Image: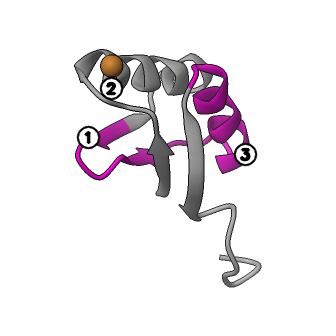
Amino acid sequence: MIQFNVEGMSCQHCVGAVTRAIREHDAEAKVEVDLPSGRVTVESKQSADVLKTAIDEAGYTVVAVSGSGTVAGPANA
Ligand SMILES: [Cu+2]
């Protein structure tokens, strides 16, 4: 699970755009968007880097990323 803090989302259109951007890279991704906090939670096989780029390219700003693939953890987990 990866969490992105995203700036620039203000309505359901934005939620849809971010969700679509992620699904373009992983059609089976589970995407949950909490609009008030700007938090996007993703379950995906794609790397956080790929998904971050997708969100950025959709016109939003990823200000923080946490979760698998980006932060320290057991190397072989
Ligand atoms: Cu919007």
Residue at left offset 76%, top offset 79%? 75
Q: Which mark is residue 49?
A: 3
Which label's residue is closer to the chain start, 1 or 3? Answer: 1
Q: Is residue 57 rendered to the left or right of residue 31?
A: right
Q: Is residue 69 above or below residue 45?
A: below
Q: Can you tell me which quadrant of the image ligand 1 is in?
A: top left
Q: Secondary structure at mark 1?
A: loop
Residue 10 magenta-highlighted: no
Q: In which quadrant of the rendered view does residue 13 lie?
A: top left
Label 3, residues with CA under 10 Å away: few <14, some 14-19, many ≥20? few
Q: Where does the magenta region start and end?
A: 31-59
Q: Is residue 29 above or below residue 47?
A: above
- Mark in front: 1 vs 3: 1
Q: Is residue 3 rendered to the left or right of residue 55?
A: left
Q: Secondary structure at mark 3?
A: helix
Which residue position is annotated with label 2? Answer: 15
